[in-house]
Amino acid sequence: MKTKVFPLLVLLCSFALTAQSPSDYTIVFTSQAKVNLHENQRQNINSFFGVALGRRIEPKTDSDWVYFDGGGFVKFAYHSDENMVLDSSEFIKSMQLGLLVPSTEYEAVQSIIKNYGAPPMLPEVEKYQDHAHFYYFHAPGGQIFRIVNSEKTLPKKGGVLFDAEKAEKYGADDYGMKKYVFAFLKRGPNRSLPKEEADALQMAHLENIGKLAQEGKLVLAGPFFGNDDLRGIYIFNVDSLEEAKTLTETDPAIQAGSLTMELKEWYGSAALMAVNQIGLTLAKKSIMD
């Protein structure tokens, strides 16, 4: 069985196009890909990528190799057999490429694409509607492009889009990581409390966890299963062991000697900063009830 690779997009040609030079903007693409499409789309590919977007095209017998400033290329392979291409219902499965456009050229380039007739991708879906910052569209052949006007929103390798706003909000470094302080909660020397006092202490312990989480200092907390000396963990959003120790000492269970903590600096994903917010949407009940 022949494998269908990417969808076919049928366009009505021809359109009046404004030629762009390669220096006007950069298509960011650092790998290679193959797009299967019908042979009747060859003129569309050349007019869109070559004339409208100013890309260098190397023609072959049954394909065109379109080169991008990011160092990669896409091979458009032409077929007479309709079974070699995807139909329009499978657009969503096509690849996504990032097109970096200077802010001063953003509206002009978007206008060229719209005038050409390349339709916006899934215009009814909310995340594709923020055209002030980027614009998703289907190019000839069906592949999806995202136009952006800032390097901060360029896609990473593998097609994952870099979200500069979240990276800054969560304190991520260039690798999407950040420093935390990891705390191991251990059984303390003072565990022989009457039930009422132990219950009250546990409630105060949980209230303090909630307070630190609301302040953004405590990213994650939870108990271990079992009944050994290692009782649970905290992950603090702080820069130093000293600050983590100060926060640790606000825990009533630490103050009472019911728990002790061992602190260790830790390097982990900055995405952990979103755990508390997401967690609130998943809980039917409060642990405080």
Image (cartoon, grey):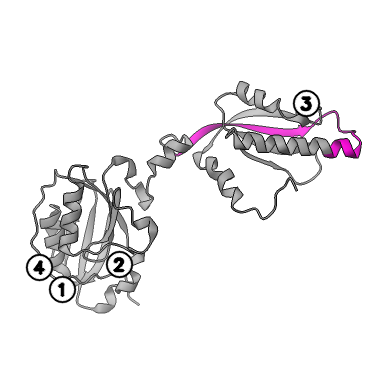
- Three-letter residue code for mark 4: Ser
Dot label at residue 6: 2
Q: CA distance from mark 2 to mark 3?
A: 62 Å
Task: Relative to 1, say whether 110 is above or below.
Answer: above
Q: Earlier in the sequence, mark 2 or mark 3?
A: 2
Task: Relative to 225, say whether 182 is above or below.
Answer: above
Q: CA distance from mark 2 to mark 1?
A: 15 Å
Q: Nearer the viewer, mark 2 or mark 4?
A: 4
- Three-letter residue code for mark 1: Asn
Which span of residues is magenta-colored?
Answer: 176-199
Q: Nearer the viewer, mark 2 or mark 3?
A: 3
Circle 2 packing at 10 Å, graded few (<14), some (14-19), many (20+), is: many
Q: Pointer 4: what residue?
A: 14
Q: Position of residue 242 (x, y in %)?
A: 62, 21
Left or right of 67 in this view: 199: right
Q: Earlier in the sequence, mark 1 or mark 3?
A: 1
